[in-house]
Structure formats: structure tokens, C-alpha cells
Image: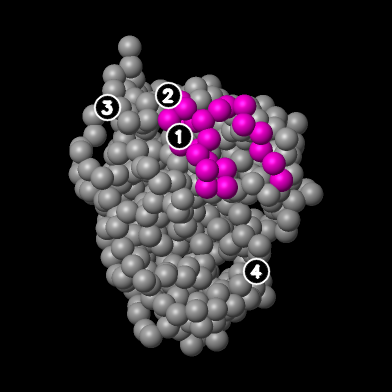
């Protein structure tokens, strides 16, 4: 039996009488608890003009086929309660025919996922731009289930409702780090052009499974988008040219391994047999890796690291043993498995926990016990939508951080400190920062005639 979840009484929980124009509550209905920024559910009106393929079709049939994030029963109830309008006139019949030129309005009771309640750090600010340190978990623009819990909305709320933040570069929702926000149209346009050109050097830092090779590692495998819907990209010969230069900053083996006497031949023999029987056991420990993308393909760093056999430790797609098997897609350039991989990703719904970082049973058991976002047995008492639980910490970001952007002619350079997950764990020595003097990767990049600058691409969400 599903339980209805009560809501606090407020103006956004009542079904609106007016459907057009869209509702726009101010101040934004934020509230905070358990380290998360939350949005009180609110009514929101989507508007769209009739598409060619919708002409002459019943309204319910269109929504059942095109908008599958909610069940058809929901759309039936919404129609009957007056949540749909065509050209400003409320409709109630599921059989209403949609015609060419019709403006369809659909009012929903919107439930947004929470994001990390972490301040947006300011790295630099002048009259034209502000350089920020974006927290993980926050999408840059309103998209999908996220609207007010997006970077542009949060910044506008924190500053001035009349001010429109103008992002000049993009980062994936799960990625943290340097972003440029234009304060004026002129400032945004100038910086966007610089970033889209080959005159900006970018540096990321990632935490990957296993012991990444020492020295510079150059990956030049082409990348092909396999499924835009699932966000899946793979190494394929017919993909777009891609090049990344990597260098390991540190390797942190598990304490249990470091305590093993290297002269103990019995222990060494057991470890060899264990690795032969369970190859993912070799992935114990983790490395902190610097990443310099020379091109700017979607998911370039994540895909190249997976191909090298060292995916980002908590990557929900590319470090998922349930999807890619125990080898985690290392060295895979064959498209024969693509359909199977997409099918597995598609089946991973919110009632399950993704097997990221599940390389052996001890870790897998611990991971399954963590809190994760999934469907609950509760429904909203306003719209009867099934409710999600809060996301777990492992679902609020991945170990990938855009650490530094610098102009190739050295006119400007902005960087953040290393994120907490990249610092040495207790009991270990390791880098807390890097400097130009200790940066052999810079020399190697110039040797490649790349200068660390990134070629423009139609989508620069490199992570």
C-alpha cells in the first residue's frame, strides 16, 4: 500500500486556477536539511507548440508516447483536474485533438531532486566576469528534473532576480570546478570566444581505481557518442579525434597491502592466485591523476580513463561492473557489446543501487548498504507522484574536478585548490598542491606541440 506524503501548507501546494502564464514563485522555495539544498514542490507550467507528428492526434496519446517520465494514469488525472490547456483554454477530455499551430500548456506539481548545500566559491571577480568553483551535483542550466536547483537559478537567487548569469563554459552536473560566469553580455561573449578557441589551457584532477602508470600517459583514441539518451560514449575507430595527456600525482594503496612483507613468498603467491581468479582485485587502492584534454569531446576524460583500465572510482556509468563486467571496459574498441551495454544501463532504475566501485565482494557489500536515491512506497498527496528518497553521497558527484583554466599567452590564470577527495588520506604522504616548477607535464605538452590548449567542440563538457 502506498502512503501519501504530506506537504507543508504553502501557496505552491494548491492547484493553480490560472495556467498561463507559467507560475514563477519568488523567492524560490528553497529549504535546507541534512547538508542538502531542497526545493519545496511547486506547480509549474510547461508550454510547447504542436509538433508536426502530433497533428490530428488525441492529447492523451501524445503525452503517453512522448513524455514517459510519468505513467498514463497521471496524465488522465491531470486532464480531468484541468491541468492541460490548448491556446489558453482548459481542456478536460483525453480525446481532444491537437491541431497545427496549437499552444499546449501542461501544469505539473514539480518535484526537484536535492543538491549539495555547498557555497558557490568565488575564485575571481571583476566588472565583466566572475570565476567560480562549482560544487558537484548541480547542473549548470535548468534541465530534466532540475529547475530551481540549477547553477544559474541559485546564483540569480543569491544575487539579484533581475540579473541573468551567463555561463561561458560547461561542466557536467556531477563534476566540480572552475566555471566562468559573464556578468554582462559583452563579458560573457568575450570569454566564451576565448574558451571556444585553442587559446585556453585546461587541467582537471581525477581519482581513479588502481595504480595508474607513472610518467606521462597519452591517450589518442577517438570517441563516438553511442546513446545521447543514456549519456554513453565509447572508444570507436569511427569516432571523433580525441587526445588527453595524463600524469599520476599519487598512488594510495590499501593499508592491508602496504603492511604485507614483500619477502613473504607465501603471501605473494596467494596474491598472484587471487588476481588470476578475481582480476578486479588488482584494482585495490586508488590514484590521483592530472588530466590535460587537448581536444574537447563529451565525456572525454571519463572515457579515456576507462579505456586505460583506470576509470574514475565512483563514475556511475564508466566504472560500473554490472554494466561492463569485471574488466570495466578496459581496451574495448568493439561495438558488438553496445546494445547489451545500453540495455543494462537502461534497466538500472532508481529501485537499484549502481555497482560503481564494486570490484570485490567486501566493497560491494559496503556499497549496497549505503543510502541511495530510489523509489519509495510513498506518493505525493497533491499529485500522487511516486516519491524518490534522498540521493546518497556517491550519487551527488564524481571524483573529477576542473582545477585550472589558463590563457595560453599567460595573460590570466585561475585555479582552485585540490578537492578534499584528492588530498592524502590519514597516515599517507602525498601532494597537497602542484606548482609550475614541479610541473613536468607542462614540458611534455609543449613537446607534443599541444601547449595544453583545448580544441573547440560543439559540446565542451569534457568530463
| Residue drawn 56% across the image and 28% down it | 93
How far is the residue under mark 2 from the one under mark 3? 18 Å
351 left or right, relative to 310: left
Comparing 449 with 242, the one in front is 242
The reply to whether the C-beta atoms of the residues labelled 2 and 4 are less than 8 Å apart is: no
How far is the residue under mark 3 from the one under mark 4? 47 Å
Q: Nearer the viewer, mark 2 or mark 4?
A: 2
The reply to whether the C-beta atoms of the residues labelled 4 and 1 are less than 8 Å apart is: no
Q: What residue would you read off at disc 2?
A: 351
Secondary structure of residue under mark 1: loop
Furthest-top residue in this view: 1
How far is the residue under mark 2 from the one under mark 4? 39 Å
Q: Residue 302: x percent and y percent?
A: 55, 49
How far is the residue under mark 4 from the one under mark 1? 47 Å
Comparing 280 with 175, the one in front is 175
Q: Nearer the viewer, mark 2 or mark 3?
A: 3
Q: Please tell me in which quadrant of the rendered image residue 100 appears.
A: top right
| Residue drawn 78% across the image and 48% down it | 237
Q: What residue would you read off at disc 1?
A: 82
Amino acid at each position: 500500500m502506498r502512503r501519501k506524503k504530506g506537504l507543508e501548507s504553502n501557496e505552491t501546494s494548491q492547484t493553480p486556477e490560472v495556467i498561463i502564464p507559467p507560475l514563477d514563485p519568488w523567492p524560490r522555495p528553497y529549504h535546507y536539511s541534512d547538508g542538502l539544498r531542497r526545493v519545496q514542490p511547486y506547480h509549474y507550467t510547461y508550454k510547447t507548440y504542436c509538433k508536426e507528428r502530433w497533428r490530428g492526434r488525441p492529447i492523451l496519446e501524445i503525452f503517453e508516447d512522448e513524455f514517459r517520465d510519468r505513467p498514463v494514469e497521471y496524465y488522465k488525472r491531470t486532464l480531468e483536474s484541468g491541468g492541460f490547456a490548448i491556446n489558453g483554454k482548459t481542456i478536460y477530455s483525453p480525446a481532444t485533438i491537437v491541431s497545427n499551430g496549437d499552444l499546449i500548456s501542461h501544469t505539473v506539481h514539480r518535484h526537484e531532486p536535492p543538491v549539495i548545500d555547498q557555497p558557490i566559491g568565488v575564485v575571481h571577480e571583476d566588472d565583466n566576469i566572475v570565476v567560480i568553483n562549482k560544487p558537484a551535483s548541480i547542473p549548470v542550466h535548468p534541465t530534466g528534473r532540475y529547475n530551481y536547483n540549477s547553477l544559474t537559478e541559485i546564483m540569480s537567487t543569491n544575487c539579484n532576480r533581475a540579473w541573468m548569469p551567463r555561463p561561458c563554459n560547461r561542466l557536467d552536473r556531477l563534476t566540480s570546478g572552475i566555471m566562468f560566469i559573464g556578468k554582462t553580455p559583452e563579458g560573457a561573449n568575450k570569454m566564451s570566444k576565448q574558451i571556444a578557441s585553442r587559446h585556453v589551457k585546461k587541467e582537471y584532477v581525477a581519482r581513479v581505481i588502481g595504480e595508474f602508470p607513472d610518467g606521462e600517459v597519452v591517450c589518442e583514441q577517438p570517441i563516438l557518442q553511442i546513446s545521447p539518451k543514456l549519456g554513453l560514449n565509447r572508444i570507436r575507430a569511427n569516432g571523433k579525434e580525441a587526445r588527453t595527456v595524463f600524469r599520476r600525482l599519487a598512488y594510495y594503496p590499501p593499508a592491508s597491502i602496504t603492511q604485507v612483507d614483500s619477502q613473504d613468498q607465501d603471501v605473494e603467491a596467494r596474491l598472484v592466485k587471487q588476481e588470476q581468479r578475481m582480476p578486479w582485485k588488482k584494482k585495490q587502492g586508488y590514484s590521483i591523476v592530472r588530466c590535460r584534454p587537448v581536444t574537447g569531446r563529451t565525456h572525454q576524460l571519463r572515457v579515456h580513463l576507462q579505456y586505460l583500465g583506470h576509470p574514475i572510482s565512483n563514475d556511475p556509468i564508466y566504472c560500473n561492473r554490472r554494466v561492463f563486467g569485471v574488466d570495466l571496459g578496459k581496451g574495448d574498441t568493439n561495438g558488438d557489446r553496445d546494445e547489451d551495454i545500453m540495455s543494462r544501463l537502461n534497466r538500472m532504475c532508481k529501485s537499484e543501487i549502481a555497482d560503481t566501485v564494486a570490484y570485490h565482494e567486501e566493497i560491494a557489500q559496503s556499497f549496497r548498504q549505503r543510502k541511495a536515491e530510489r523509489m519509495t512506497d510513498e506518493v505525493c498527496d497533491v499529485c500522487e507522484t511516486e516519491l524518490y528518497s534522498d540521493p546518497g553521497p556517491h550519487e551527488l558527484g564524481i571524483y573529477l574536478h576542473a582545477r585550472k583554466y589558463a590563457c595560453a599567452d599567460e595573460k590570466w590564470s585561475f585555479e582552485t585548490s585540490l578537492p578534499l577527495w584528492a588530498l592524502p588520506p590519514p597516515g599517507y604522504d602525498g601532494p597537497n598542491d602542484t606548482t609550475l616548477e614541479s610541473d613536468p607535464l607542462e614540458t611534455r605538452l609543449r613537446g607534443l606541440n599541444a601547449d595544453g590548449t583545448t580544441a573547440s567542440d560543439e559540446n565542451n563538457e569534457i568530463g
